[in-house]
Amino acid sequence: MVLPAVLGCAGGPFAAREASSSLPEAGRGAAVAVLPFANATGSSLRVPPPGFARVVPGPLDDPYTEQDQTVTLLLQQRASVELARRGYVVVPPERVARALPNPPEDVLEAARAAAAAGFGGPALVGTLRRFHLTETGLLQVWLDLALVDPAGPRVLWTASARRPAHVVARTQTWQDVLLDAGGPIFEDAFGPVQQRPASREAPRASPGRK
């Protein structure tokens, strides 16, 4: 899925915009469906089996073809978690997986597919364009995101996560890499999690002395 090409020329209803500092309020209220992310990196980015130590950096193509998990799937799952942390209601990932197992070809198809699946709220679509870990433990990322209103259809918000993320360990699986980098990736795209002020109870009057 190529977001900029599909979003159209500037000024149109699907015009691409600069990365926003935070998610729109318009997406709140109805549950957001996080659709499968597209992989435009040119590499499979398959996840090694859990507990199997793989030396990274190295070739991005993963030889362990028995696994169904990929980096894009883990990013899709992490996006649901990060939206919930920011106060959004999300469609359960298993429901999305049953209705839409494959990434949509473009934003318009994403809107149609979300509407056909019965998702009443916005749909988040994403395209991963770069995912490379350097020898110094710097994860280079380029993830394009768009929040689409299927009812319009129209694009409510677009952003890109392109800020490199530091990874603690150099010998680990892609799952471990995303444990370190998942939060910073989506903070770059979604904006920081807003801390809600703690509620304070009114001080109680001290009982009078007799």
Image: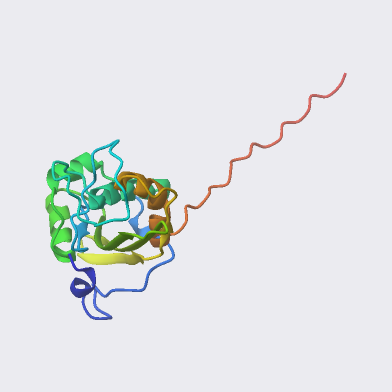
Q: Quick one: which residue is furthest to the bottom in this view?
A: 10
Is residue 156 in sight in this rendering? yes
**Colour convention of the picture:** rainbow
Q: Which residue is drawn at 36% across and 60% down?
A: 134
Residue found 20% across the figure and 44% down from its top: 69
> Residue at the spot x=58%, y=42% of the render?
198
Pick the front one: 18 or 23: 18
Q: Is residue 32 visible?
A: no
Q: In this view, does 66 lie to the left or right of 147?
A: left
Note whether 163 is above or below 81 in the view shown. Answer: below
Position of residue 164 measured from the top left corner of the image (x, y, whole percent)? 41, 63
Q: In this view, does 51 lie to the left or right of 104?
A: right
- Image quadrant assignment for residue 203: top right
Q: Answer left or right for 70 relative to 137.
A: left
Q: Quadrant of residue 40?
A: bottom left
Residue 155, position as x, y percentages in the image:
26, 66
Residue 54: image x %, image y %?
29, 45
